[in-house]
Image: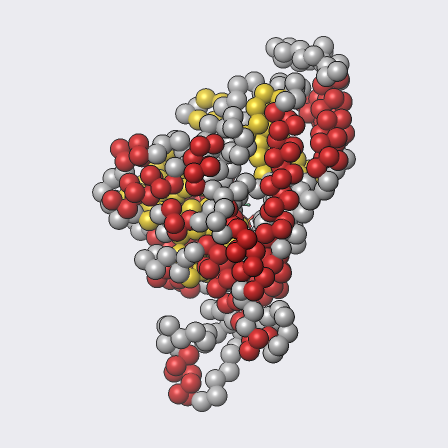
Amino acid sequence: MQDCDYQNTRLTHLGRDTSVSAGFVNVPVCRGSTILADNLEQWAQRKEPDNPYASYGRFTNPTLQTLTQAVAELEGGFQASLFPSGLAACTHALLGMLEVGDHLLIPDSVYGPVRAFAQQVLASRMGIQVQFYEPSLAEGIASLIRPNTKVVYVESPGSATFEIQDIPAIARCAHAVGAYVLLDNTWATPLFFKPFEHGVDVSIQAATKYLTGHSDALLGIATANERAWPLLRRAAHDFGQTAGPDDAFLALRGMRTLGVRLRQHQASALHIARFLENHPQVQQVLHPALESHPGHAIWKRDFTGSTGLFGVVLEPLSEAQLSRFFKTLRLFGIGLSWGGFESLALPMDMPKRNGRTLFGEGRLLRLHVGLEEPQHLQQDLAQALDAAYALNTSRNTSGLRLVAQQA
Ligand SMILES: *Cc1c(COP(=O)(O)O)cnc(C)c1O
């Protein structure tokens, strides 16, 4: 927790160069493609690779640069690149590091679209050896690493299953063969996990989520250390990746309140997670800050906080009961994405591991706990669970366990 308070102060003050904003508190939205030079000598300087002033709007502009510098500082990395979505940041970071014939290790708990990209593009079309690994592997990953392993991808906690990974141990094994460690740090944000202190080489934010924080933009940011930066920058440039200045502005505006928002998401989500953990219709709550979570010890060692997204495995229920549950919810919306101010709930496909379904007969939901009053969210879930399990299921639910109605 050493630097949480310090981080809040930095969130307020970083990225406020008044020479860029002409004295205004906020850097303006800089729109544009052409950047004029005063003379040929200045033009030649602009085109030098390390010149801080871009020669063209696709490479950066004052709004975009304010954001990349701020995020690079928060993550603790060297420099950052912007992408039009979180997924684009993940895929282009991978493209930047990998060549034909390289071996890539990806955890089984990875965000679904990254899994699809690895299989459908990297493996099928680009000749990269893609191997999925059990996310709980720590030093054990050494046995999977090959001389041509170029990237070990990590995501902690993983999407859908919320498994925590031992990133420092994985990074030690990866670095032994010179591989890069790429992290999807969207869940923790740089406030609650410092990737570069734990051996990560590239840290990716779906800024769409908490950084922007208001469900009003799509944006990705990848931050690299000095070793990985030339490859990341080249990938962004070669593929023509950039982001719109309005979205970057929204991310900067969201960033100012990231600390206070996360404080509330954390407290409210823990309140709801503990309520659900004691609910008779709940089999399991997948939240790494709960003592019951299998990755709790590693989470406590490496992270300085938890956020608003977690999983809950309900006792078996029919489609009709599930439908009743969602129809009865009043405060939780049904929808993709998360990290905004609003609460969301979504049924998830039951995750598979080596052909076996995890969590048996239960039903996995993903909850994002927003900024509503936690007591109201608890009441909302309680009444929806009551309504769902009260529904008569004696017909067409053969094989389902009958559960007692909550008192
Ligand atoms: C949402 C998400 C992404 C992708 O972000 P988009 O901006 O929606 O493309 C990547 N990783 C994780 C863990 C996410 O939850």
- Res 224 quadrant in image: bottom left
Q: Is residue 91 visible?
A: no
Q: Is 168 left or right of 290, judged from the image as shown?
A: left
Identify the residue at horizontal 63%, vertical 11% (top origin): 401
Q: Is 79 left or right of 350, judged from the image as shown?
A: left
Residue 392: % across, % down: 75, 14
Q: Residue furthest bottom?
A: 39
Identify the residue at horizontal 28%, vertical 46% (top origin): 175
Residue situated in front as seen by the camera: 266 or 108: 266
The count of marks equals 0
Q: Is residue 406 visible?
A: yes
Q: Residue furthest left?
A: 147
Residue situated in front as seen by the camera: 175 or 107: 175
Identify the residue at horizontal 62%, vertical 69% (top origin): 26
Residue situated in front as seen by the camera: 133 or 374: 374
Please name the colour scheme applied to the rendered image: secondary structure
Q: Is 379 left or right of 91, judged from the image as shown?
A: right
- Res 63 quadrant in image: bottom right
Residue 110: % across, % down: 46, 38
Residue 302: % across, % down: 43, 41
Identify the residue at horizontal 42%, vertical 62% (top origin): 79
Residue 194: % across, % down: 44, 49
Q: Is 130 left or right of 13, judged from the image as shown?
A: left
Does residue 91 sit above or below 119 in this rendering? below
